[in-house]
Amino acid sequence: MHNTENFPRFKITAKGSKFLRSGHTWVYEDEITEAEEAANGSLVNIFSDKDKYLGTGFYSKNSKIRVRIISDNKNDKFDDAFWKRRFEYAWQYRKDVMRKEDLNSCRIIFGETDGFPGLTVDKFADILVIQVLSFGLNAIKETLISILVEVLKEDGQNIAGVFERNDSELRVLEGLEEGKGWLFKYTELPSSFSEVIICENGIKYSVDFINGQKTGFFLDQKYNRLAVSSLARGKRVLECFTHTGSFALNAIAGGAEAVTAIDISASALETAKKNAALNSVLNAEEKIIFVKADVFNLLTALVENKTGTDWDTVRKNGPYDMIILDPPAFAKHRNVRDRGLKGYGEINKKAMQLLPRGGYLATASCSRFISEDDFTSMLFETAKTVNRRLRIIEKRGQSADHPVLMGQTETEYLKFFLLQVV
């Protein structure tokens, strides 16, 4: 690739210019006022309404995000050496901010915050799982991932293969096809190979990187699970939306007396049970009871003392000193934000009613359209409706391998509160 002087020029509005100067990296379709002819996926230069150079990025003719900025340095040359430096910076950052043992399973590339717009790379032991949601990066993904693997191998990290999880509907918005499959195999792997064992916080998990949600495992709650572990000693814990059983297992590792783990998905519970079996040293299979149930209905039944086989089982394992709420995103789009807040309010209200004074509530939201202020206000107002007061122990977010880029609010999505009912 060549330096910036050879790329088509795009001019944008004053509003768009201000947006980029504030640290954001996207140029929207309606912000472009002038544009030279450019091939889909090619690099273009962005200029302000005052004709000042603002940056260079990938052009996508089908997306509302028309340009994704990769650099604001007009002297950059976008060759293999440029991308290698980017990967080296990203990997070194993970080595700086994470414990050595956490590099076994971590997010190596988190899109815009690492200078690779639309690219996600997760490392599960010796398998890399990638997702590409940008037309421009998709066109050069083989080159990019080969460079990344080279960087990792130079640092002593063995990579057995790279699997693509491009089964996201967001690719359609970029004019890309959905799909999944092996991008590279560096060693002979069985045709049925789909799971790898990772270790996080001293706990083993089986990660199905082909069929699991997203890339196979949610790495962003790594240290939040550890925070729960530190509070769990001697407690009876109710974990809602258990999914892979990760919070339940961390509670047991922290010394919880017993854990009841709830999920509506039978397949999720099977995965959680498999993970409990992997951690026999914790006696996890004996200390965790898994129940298939709808969390909303279950919490309501517990509060209202309704009877039912599953509800009675959960009630029998109580009363609970700690409740963990880690639901899926209730607001995946801006236009359902209010409905999402209502859903969060409903489950947190029931949890507050079930907990005794002095009980602990760990509650999360991964909806990026709900801000920390929104979430805080929801918790405060909900507590008032059930005559509870809340003591904030910690406000936490996503783990350090999912860094937030200041100026780009889309990169900050996870809210995690540890609270005590007082």
Image: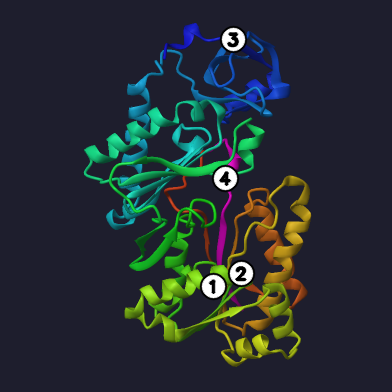
Which of 244/93 is in front? 244
Q: Residue under label 3, please give it.
A: 9
Compute the Cα span from label 1 to label 3: 53 Å
Position of residue 47 measured from the top left corner of the image (x, y, whole percent): 60, 13
Q: Height in image: 46 above or below 166?
A: above
Please tell me whether residue 420 belongs to the stretch shown in magenta: yes
**Quadrant containing the C terminus in the rendered view:** bottom right
Disc 4, SS:
loop
Q: Residue at x 33, y 28 (%)?
A: 85
Q: Residue at x 67, y 26 (%)?
A: 62
Crowd class of label 1 (few under 14; some 14 to 19; many from 20; radius 10 Å): many
Q: Residue under label 2, please give it.
A: 265
Name the amino acid, label 4: Asp
Which of 408/10 is in front? 10
Name the amino acid, label 1: Leu
Q: Nearer the viewer, mark 3 or mark 2?
A: 2
Proximity of marks 2 and 1: CB atoms separated by less than 8 Å: yes
Crowd class of label 3 (few under 14; some 14 to 19; many from 20; radius 10 Å): some
Proximity of marks 3 and 2: CB atoms separated by less than 8 Å: no
Which residues fall within the magenta stretch? 406-422
- For residue 167, the mark is 4
Position of residue 387 measured from the top left corner of the image (x, y, whole percent): 73, 78
Q: Nearer the viewer, mark 1 or mark 3?
A: 1
Left or right of 264, for residue 248? left
Task: Tell me which label, 2 or 4, sits earlier in the chain.
Answer: 4
